[in-house]
Amino acid sequence: MTTPRAFISFDFDHNEAEKHLFVGQARNSRTPFSIEDWSSKSSLPLIQWEQSIADKIKKCNILIVLVGKTMASATGVAKEIAFAKVADVPVFGVYVDGADETSNLPDGLSRSCTFTWEWNKIALAIETCMGIGKNK
């Protein structure tokens, strides 16, 4: 099996540091996935950003949402989740920056698919999304 590719969705204005920490830890973990840094490097007109991000998400196997305390104001995250759903890319969330079960979730992200930042939970979610260990 090839290594699953993950798109990381996060609140750029509030959780960029957590995104860098998450990516760094992922490289050193035994969690079976790779992260491509496909964040937009420059500001684009909305229609170009939407097309670019939708295309990048289609190339991934999983979308991981880093859920911070200010997630309700991150409209781009909700759009990325919607793009993933259209492309049939599984989505799950990981609480960061002190967020927890009482924090707001972006539209389209299920509370039952969002959990604390623990690599064993992330690995299990990836395995579940990829159908590893399931009878097909």
Image: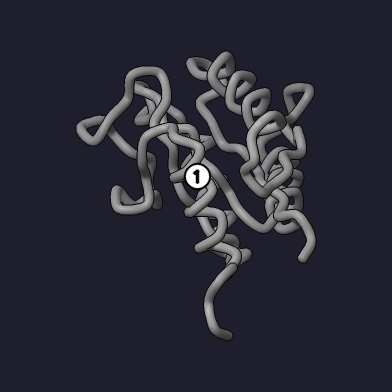
Determine which quarter of the picture holds residue 131: bottom right
Which structural element holds mark 1? helix
Toward the viewer: 36 or 127?
127
Residue displayed at 37% across by 52% down: 113
Residue displayed at 68% across by 51% down: 57
What coloring was used for the rendering?
one colour
* Left or right relative to 13: residue 96: left
Toward the viewer: 21 or 69?
21
x, y percentage for residue 37?
75, 33
x, y percentage for residue 82?
51, 54
Toward the viewer: 70 or 122?
122
* Left or right relative to 84: residue 113: left
x, y percentage for residue 118?
44, 35
Toward the viewer: 46 or 69?
69
Q: Residue type at mark 1: give it.
A: Ile
Q: Indicate whether 71 appears above or below 64.
A: above
Q: Indicate whether 10 appears above or below 108.
A: above
x, y percentage for residue 8?
61, 38
Residue displayed at 60% across by 65% down: 130
Residue displayed at 56% across by 54% down: 126
Assign the C terminus to one quadrant of the image: bottom right
* Left or right relative to 55: residue 31: left
Mark 1 burial class by Cα count in 10 Å: few <14, some 14-19, many 20+: many
Residue under label 1, please give it. 122
Q: Residue furthest bottom?
A: 136
